[in-house]
Amino acid sequence: MIRFAAFSATLLLASLCQAAPAQGIDPSQPALRKPEALVLSHDGQFLLTANRGTGTVSIIDRAERKLLGEWQVGQSIIELQPLPDNRYVALDGQSHEAILLSHLDGQLAILSKAKVPYSPVKADISPDGQQIVVSCLWPRKLVSLNVAGDKLVVAQELVLPFAPRVVLFVPDGQTVLVGDNFGGKLANVDPQTLEVRYIREFPAHNIRAMTLSPDGTKLLLAHQLLNSLAVTNENDIHWGLLMSNELRWVPLDMVLDPEGDFYGNGFMHPIGEPGRGGGDPTDIAVIDDLQAIVTMGGTSQVGIGKYEAFGLFRVSVEQHPTSVVVSPEKDLAYVANGFDDSISLVDVEKAETIGKISLGATRKAELVDQGEQLFHNARLSMEGWMSCHSCHTDGHTNGLSSDNLGDNSYGAPKRILSLLGKADTAPFGWLAVSDTMEAQIHKSVKNTMHGRRLSDEETSALAAYVNSLPLPPPIDQLQQTRDEAAVAHGRQIFLQNNCIKCHAPPLYTSRESYDVGMHDKEGNREFNPPSLRGIGHRDTFFHDARATSLRDVFEIHGHQLSSELTDQQLNDLLSFLRSL
C-alpha cells in the first residue's frame, strides 16, 4: 500500500526569511556554473538559468541576447520554475530548500525559503500558481508547498514506492504525473490529498523529461530503454537494439485512464539511427502541437521532430545540453549547455545553431570535473548510443541487467551495480575481474560500450569522479522510519548468521568471492559480494536481479540464513539493512 505521510513538525518549522536582494556576482570571475535548468519569463523578455555548480541564477535579455547579471541565491540551484507573475521558485539541491524569488527592475530578490526533504530535484506549479509539487529523489518523496503571499508554506508529503524525478500538472490541475528517476514507473497523484491513485509502468528507464503538447492532448516523454535480451556487441549497439533513446508522444487521456494502453497507442521518435546514436536525452520543449525539440546531453546535440514523422533534424550545440525552451514566436530554441556555461540559439525552421550567449568566464575544469564531463559523454561509446550515465543514472543504477564482457563472457547477463560509495571497495565486477577502478573503467568503455580507447588522463579523471560519488543517507533516516531498537536487534541477527563473512563492516563487502548456492548462465558459481551500504535505495538484488525486494532476498530465496527467522526477526534484520 502507498504510504501517505502528513508533514512533520520539522517541516512545519521550515525556515522563512524576509525579502532581501540577492547578492550580485561578477560574471567575469571564472567559475563552472553548470546550468541545469532554463526558463523563459512569462512576458517573454528574459531567460533565466539555474546554475548547479555555483548556486546562482543568471538572467539574459532575450531581445539583446546578452547577459544582464548573475545572482547568488543558494548553494546548488538545480531547478527553476516561473510563477504567473515576476516570481520564480528555485530548488537548492545542496541545502534542500525551495526558494521564492522575485525579478523586478533588473534585480533578483529572495522573498522566502522553505526546507524540503533531502535531494529535491524537480518541481511543477499548478495552473493557478498556488501550489508547488516538488520531487525529492532519495527519500522517494513528493512534497506539496503553498504560495501564501511572498512565503512558501510546506503543506504535506507523500512517500512513493520509487525514486521520483519529473513532475507535471495536467491542464485542469486535478492530477500530477510523477516519473521514475531510474525505472519506467509513472504515478498518477491527486494534488489536493497528495495520494497516489495508481501507478503505470512501461518499458523505460531514466525518464528525464516530461511535458504536454500546447493543445493538452499529448504527453511527451524523453527516456532510455536498455534491452536486457541484447548483448553489448557491435551489431546490437549499431542498430540501437541494446540501448535506445526515445522521444515518445502518448495520448494524455490514455495516461489518465488506468486501463488505457498509452504505450501501444503512442508514437515514438527514435533519438538516434544506425551510425549516429543520440545518447542521453535530457529535456523536451514543444514548438507547436505537432513539433518538438529534444536535447541529447550525451552527444551535445538537439533533435527537432514532427509527430508521426520518422527521424529528427539534428543540430550541434555546446557540451552537454541540459535544458531547452522555445521562444514565444516559435522561431528560436534556447539551449542551456551544462558543461559550457552558455546558451545556444537554434533556428527552428533552418535547424541550425545561429549563435551563443556566454554566462560568464569559466575556470579550468579540475580532475573530478573532467571526470563528470566524461561520465555524461555518450561519444565515448560506439556511435554515441550511451554514456556511463545511461546505465548508472546519477551514479546509481537503473536496476536492469546487461549481457556484456564485463565478466569476460557473453551469455550471462548481470545486474548493473550502483557506483555510489564504490571507492575502496575493490575488486570490481560480479566476478571480481578488476583490481582497480581504472581497470574497470577501461574494461567498461572498451568491452561494454565498444568505444574509443581512453587516455590515462581520461581514465584517471573518470576514476576520480566515480570515487567522489557519495552514498545518500540511509533510506530509513530519510523517511524518518528508523527504529533504533529494531536496528540493534537486526544487527545481532546479522552477526549470528555470520553475514559478516561476506559483508564485513565498515564497507560491508569483501575482497573475496563466494559460492552462495547460485550460478549464472555460464556456470559461474562464485561472486564478489556487493557492498550493503545504501541497500535500501535498491530495487533488485542478486547477480541476476531475481529478487525484486529486500524482503524477498530472505523470505523467498532464503539467502544464507543459518536458521529460519520469525516474522519479527526478519523485520528487525531488514531494519538493520535499511539503516546502512
Image: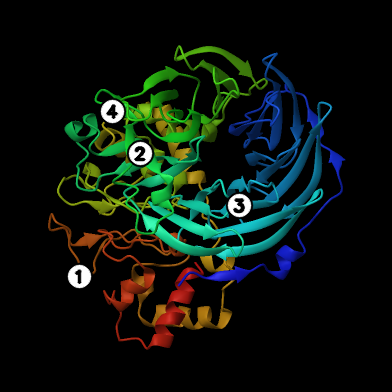
Structural crowding at the residue carrying mark 3, measured as other residues with C-alpha within 10 Å and reported as few (<14), some (14–19) or many (≥20):
many
Left or right for 42, reference 106: left
Structural crowding at the residue carrying mark 2, measured as other residues with C-alpha within 10 Å and reported as few (<14), some (14–19) or many (≥20):
many
Q: Position of residue 562 (x, y in %)?
A: 29, 83
Render colour scheme: rainbow
Q: Earlier in the sequence, mark 4 or mark 3?
A: 3
Viewer-nearest of labels 2 and 4? 4
Q: In this view of the protein, can residue 507 be seen by the observer?
A: no
Q: Earlier in the sequence, mark 3 or mark 2?
A: 3
Left or right for 103, reference 40: right
Please give the residue where the numbered disc 3 appears in the rendered image: 134
Q: CA distance from mark 4 to mark 1?
A: 37 Å
Q: CA distance from mark 1 to mark 2?
A: 29 Å
Amino acid at pointer 3: Val
Residue 111's image quarter?
A: top right
Which of the labelled discs sits on residue 382, or is there none? 4
Please give the residue where the numbered disc 1 appears in the rendered image: 517
Residue 4's image quarter?
A: bottom right
Amino acid at pointer 2: Ile
Please give the residue where the numbered disc 2 appears in the rendered image: 441
In what element is the residue under mark 4? helix
Q: CA distance from mark 3 to mark 2?
A: 35 Å
Q: Is residue 297 above or below residue 118?
A: above
Q: Earlier in the sequence, mark 2 or mark 4?
A: 4
Q: Position of residue 71 (x, y in %)?
A: 76, 32
Viewer-nearest of labels 1 and 3? 3
